[in-house]
Image (cartoon, helix red, strand yellow):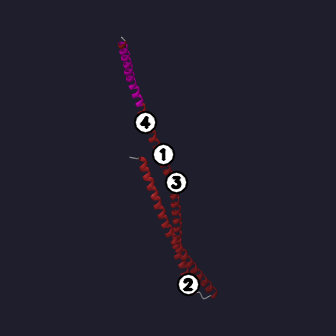
Amino acid sequence: MLGFVLGLVMFCFDSSIRAQAQTNKPADSAQGDRDQTLKQLLSEVRELRLAVQRATVSNTRFQMLIERVRVQQAHADALSRQLESVRSQVAEFKATKPQMEQQIKDAEDLLDRTPDPSAHADLESRIKDGKANLGRLAQEDERLRNRETALDTELQGAQAKLNELNGQMDALMSELKGP
């Protein structure tokens, strides 16, 4: 009888262990699902953090490029205005030169026909002043033409830099759009 009771206890104990093992399997399975879900969430949080960091860096780069483009555009605009002003002055000198030359020629023609020594001296003085002014005009014209050339070269460089910055901006925009 003792053997029967012992066998019955063993059978009950074995049954309870099996029942508990069966109930632990769903608990283990649920715990595994939670672990997997947490791992996926953690992975997504890391990806989001990287995306936010990339967006922040891209935004900073974009803002810096915008500011550089703005400054470069202002520089190119100022050079363009200076160049236009110099070109206007060159055009004025170009128009003034023939007038001055004509005034000198007219004074020389009149000088040959003037018998009065006082008027003759006055005409000679006017001719001398006119030739001096013409010489200064030629020097100023040359200085302005040199300045025009320098400004034109500087403007081309500024516009090339502006084009380069716009290219960088376009590349960044393409990068932000992504695949």
Query: Residue at left 61%, top 86%?
Result: 120
Q: Percent from the top left, x then y, of residue 144? A: 53, 71
Q: For marks 2 and 1, give the one nearer the viewer.
A: 1
**Quick one: quadrant of the N terminus?**
top left
Which one is earlier in the sequence, the residue at label 4 or at label 3? 4
Determine which residue is flagged by label 4. Answer: 39
Which one is earlier in the sequence, the residue at label 3 or at label 2? 3
Q: Which residues are magenta?
A: 4-33
For the residues labelled 2 and 4, the Cα–Cα distance comes to: 102 Å
The foreground one among 163 and 118 is 163
Q: In which quadrant of the rendered view does residue 109 lie?
A: bottom right
Q: Circle 2 — which element?
A: helix
Q: Amino acid at mark 3?
A: Glu
Which one is earlier in the sequence, the residue at label 1 or at label 4? 4
Q: Is residue 2 above or below residue 156?
A: above
Determine which residue is flagged by label 2. Answer: 108
Determine which residue is flagged by label 1. Answer: 53
Q: Which mark is residue 67?
A: 3
Q: Percent from the top left, x then y, of residue 115? A: 60, 88
Which one is earlier in the sequence, the residue at label 2 or at label 4? 4
Tell me if mark 4 has few (under 14), some (14-19) or many (20+) residues whose alpha carbon lies within 10 angstroms of its own. few
For the residues labelled 2 and 1, the Cα–Cα distance comes to: 82 Å
Which one is earlier in the sequence, the residue at label 3 or at label 1? 1
Q: Amino acid at mark 1?
A: Gln
